[in-house]
């Protein structure tokens, strides 16, 4: 029997809405089962996306981070050009490169920490304020610096490993991926609960050992649309330059840049919410 959709008695419009929600949940559960079991498929990513949709100000945070990183890189390039005669050859260039990597890593870690704190507010039902999230991250700067320094040391170790003939590159990539997944929840633990680096590393490793499948699958589901968007942006750019029309080239470059920027902002924001959500579940 078709329920009337115009009454407010709770059996009409709201009844139809409840039926629609139940149908959607059934389809979602079936999809999750097909992709690896309940809560192991797309559901955690979808629920994180709903949080992001309800708090769209989170999307601005990766954009702000990108502007700051671009400014820092521009400053470093200008510094290298200005100091080129005084750098003293390859040793000076290497020192400046390491300093640049350290600065960019610290900036990225800070903005990731602020995003995690904002996502935690959203998941807790608290008001989300971008400025307040940055202020809270600034108060945790020692922990952020410790995690950034760890990342720099890992990067240096990977650069040395990559110099090993034949197998160095493969080992560096494999160990880098393993390290990234094993430490996926370190920053949320340090920011949300104030854990020290050692405890955060231990807890993240345990969480990955217990729930690694969800972390890997969720990361892939988040990365895939961004990758497709980047490929589409590249295709648009190629088509624009093949047209041999200046106006079309400019339009294609602007369109490709906007598409890549939006895809990156959505992917980074969604990843921050997803990481925070998994950590909150792991500690529950």
Image (tube, helix red, strand yellow):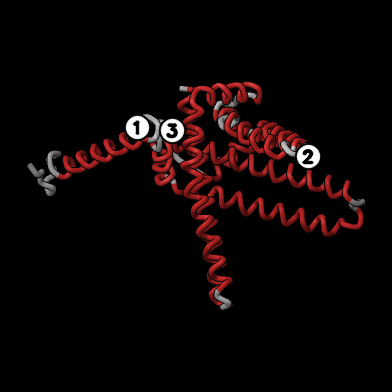
Residue 249 image point, x, y percent: 57, 72
At 67% from the left and 33% from the top, the residue drawn is: 147
> Regarding mark 1 in the picture, which secondary structure is present there?
helix
Q: Point out which mark residue 207 bears.
A: none
Identify the image quadrant of residue 16.
top left
Residue where numbered disc 3 is placed? 124
N-terminal label among 3 and 2 = 3
Residue 149 image point, x, y percent: 72, 34
At 55% from the left and 45% from the top, the residue drawn is: 131
Task: Indicate the quadrant containing the C terminus: top left, top right, bottom left or bottom right.
Answer: top left
At 88% from the left and 49% from the top, the residue drawn is: 90
Q: CA distance from mark 1 to mark 2?
A: 44 Å
Q: CA distance from mark 1 to mark 3?
A: 28 Å
> Regarding mark 3 in the picture, which secondary structure is present there?
helix
Please say if the residues under marks 1 and 2 sit with CB atoms less than 8 Å apart: no
Residue where numbered disc 2 is placed? 163
N-terminal label among 1 and 3 = 1
Residue 279 image point, x, y percent: 50, 29
Q: Answer above or below: position of 233 versus 26.
A: below
Q: Point out which mark residue 33 bears.
A: 1
How crowded pointer 3 is (Cα within 10 Å; few <14, some 14-19, many 20+) is rated as few
Residues 37 and 118: in front is 37
């Amino acid at each position: 029997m078709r329920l009337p959709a115009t009454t407010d008695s709770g059996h009409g419009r709201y009844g139809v809405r409840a039926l629609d929600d139940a149908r959607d949940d059934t389809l979602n559960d079936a999809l999750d089962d097909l992709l690896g079991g309940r809560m192991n498929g797309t559901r955690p990513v979808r629920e994180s996306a709903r949080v992001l949709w309800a708090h769209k100000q989170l999307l601005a945070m990766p954009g702000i981070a990108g502007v700051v990183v671009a400014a820092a890189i521009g400053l470093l390039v200008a510094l290298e050009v200005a100091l080129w005669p005084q750098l003293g050859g390859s040793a000076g260039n290497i020192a400046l490169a390491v300093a640049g990597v350290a600065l960019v890593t610290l900036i990225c870690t800070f903005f990731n920490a602020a995003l995690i704190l904002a996502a935690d507010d959203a998941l807790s039902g608290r008001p989300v304020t971008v400025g307040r999230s940055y202020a809270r991250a600034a108060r945790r700067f020692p922990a952020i610096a410790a995690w950034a320094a760890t990342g720099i040391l890992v990067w240096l170790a990977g650069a040395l490993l990559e110099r090993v003939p034949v197998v160095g590159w493969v080992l560096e990539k494999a160990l880098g991926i393993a390290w990234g997944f094993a430490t996926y929840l370190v920053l949320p633990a340090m920011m949300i609960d104030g854990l020290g680096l050692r405890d955060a590393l231990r807890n993240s490793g345990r969480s990955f050992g217990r729930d690694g499948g969800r972390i890997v699958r969720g990361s892939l589901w988040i990365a895939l649309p961004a990758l497709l968007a980047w490929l589409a942006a590249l295709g648009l750019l190629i088509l624009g330059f093949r047209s041999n029309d200046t106006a079309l080239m400019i339009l294609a470059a602007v369109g490709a840049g906007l598409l890549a920027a939006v895809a990156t902002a959505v992917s980074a924001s969604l990843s921050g919410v997803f990481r925070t959500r998994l950590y909150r579940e792991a500690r529950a």
